[in-house]
Image: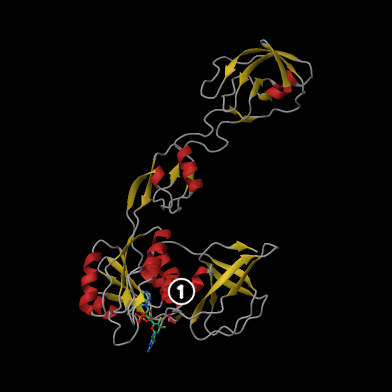
Amino acid sequence: MISVSQALAYINDNRIEQPSETVSLNAALGRVLSKPVTATLTQPPLSASAMDGYAVKLDDVKTAGATLTVIGEAPAGSPFKGAVSTGQAVRIFTGGAVPNGANTVIIQENVTRNGDTITVNEPQDAARHIRHAGIDFLKGDQLIAAGTRLGPSELLVAAAAGHGTLSVKRRLNVAILSNGNELVTPGEPVGTGQIVNANPTALAALIAQWGGVPHILPTARDSVDSILKSLSAASDADIIVPVGGASVGDHDHMRGAFTHAGLSMIFEKVAVRPGKPTWFGALSRQRVLGLPGNPASAVVCAHLFLKPLLGVHTPILTARLDTPLGSNGPRESYLRAVASFNNSGQLCVSALPAQDSGLMSPFLKANALLRLSPGQSAQKAGESVEIIQIGDFAAV
Ligand SMILES: Nc1nc2c(c(=O)[nH]1)N[C@H]1C(S)=C(S)[C@@H](COP(=O)(O)OP(=O)(O)OC[C@H]3O[C@@H](n4cnc5c(N)ncnc54)[C@H](O)[C@@H]3O)O[C@H]1N2
Ligand code: MOO
């Protein structure tokens, strides 16, 4: 058995290089940039007014009762062509280009207008309300680094920087292959001795969340031939995720079938709980991550190993333990747990009471995995522990 950190090192060393593709900006949410985003223009492109009012010289509006002559207008999109001289004002609107000669904008609430004359009601002591050219970014600035996952903020800036398309990494195709004579498709009648094939649905949802394209292969029965038949539909996959049949029983055929298909094994058996039978190998250009059939083992090990294989990093967070924990066994453990912020804003966590790797309903509550080192001694409430986020953290 290898440690979790050794397994992660193998995963990182054997990740698939994702080629680039160009997608329209509106289809780029959640994609990972393969080239940096550089500004094709300066923003704002011109010094612009932040308010509706009059563009003037500050010295002309320092005293109440001062009068100025309005010589033109500067709405957004139609700059005033002339210049503002002493005693003059240009009617300006939010977003309008500040005309030459003006160094402040006095808002319309602070003047009285009469024909082409304005009278200052509120004397001004400083230049205000101008957004100067380039205060956001300058043409040529590198704004977003390659490798960034694109969210709404990145798309806002990329659009403003003049990009209609972006160069992103191609999504990885991930084929999920479940196996077991007892498995029945969700929604179908379940006979004696059968169970619902729940794992692929959850794994497909996680894969989509992590930016991959999931594809559920036909469920294989407990035979090498049946597994190879399902596998024949996976030729387009970058990653294959066999689930179940990973252990040592007489009906566990998954690794045997992949070996028959030409798998070169990179590791098998990880000192992790749940998920000991997890295995990883290469089938020509494809990567194969075998997950155990127990649902909690499959889901936890997808978070631990499949997510980084898809190039998505999970930070390890520190939280305050709310409920004491007993000592850990020899495997690194990941307990399904509930984390939340307390009144002081501190992140707190408690492990759920039921941790059997066959249980699925605890995932309805769990938003974190609480990590215990191999041989970790018992811990009291108030101690610091490490967690991985798997769902939204609530405030209590
Ligand atoms: N003698 C030993 N037995 C077992 C060991 C061991 O070291 N020595 N390891 C145990 C551990 S740890 C795990 S985890 C399981 C994993 O076994 P498999 O990957 O071979 O999983 P299966 O036997 O196929 O199934 C286990 C369990 O999960 C249910 N299952 C399977 N696939 C699905 C699915 N797609 N959706 C929902 N549920 C599924 C299956 O019915 C079984 O109940 O092995 C231990 N045994
Ligand atoms: O490692 Mo198994 O996943 O404990 O049940």
Residue 262 shows up from this direction: no
The quarter of the rendering in which ligand 2 is drawn is bottom left
Residue neighbourhood size for the residue with mark 1, other residues' Cα within 10 Å, grouped as few (<14), some (14–19), many (≥20): some
- Give the residue at the far right of this rendering: 64
- Residue drawn where x is 30% and y is 78% of the image: 180
Identify the residue shown where x is 23% and y is 64%: 235
Please tell me whether mark 1 sits on a helix, a strand or a loop: loop
> What residue did someone put label 1 on?
360
Q: Position of residue 171 (x, y in %)?
A: 35, 56
Total marks placed: 1
Q: Where is residue 56 drawn, in percent x and y?
A: 67, 20
Colour style of the rendered protein structure:
secondary structure
Q: Quadrant of the N terminus?
A: bottom left
In the image, 279: left or right of 352? left
Residue at (63% x, 81% y) in the render: 379
As displayed, is residue 64 above or below residue 40?
above
For this orientation, the residue located farthest to the top is 115
Is 56 in front, or is 394?
394
- Taking 266 as reference, is 235 left or right? left
Residue 77 in view of the camera:
yes
The answer to whether the beta carbon of the residue marked 1 is less than 8 Å from any atom of ligand 1 is: yes
Residue depicted at 48% across the width and 83% down the height: 331
User: Quarter of the image holding residue 106?
Assistant: top right
- Residue 386: where, in percent of width, then height? 57, 72
Q: Nearer the viewer, residue 275 or 105?
A: 275
Q: Amino acid at mark 1?
A: Met
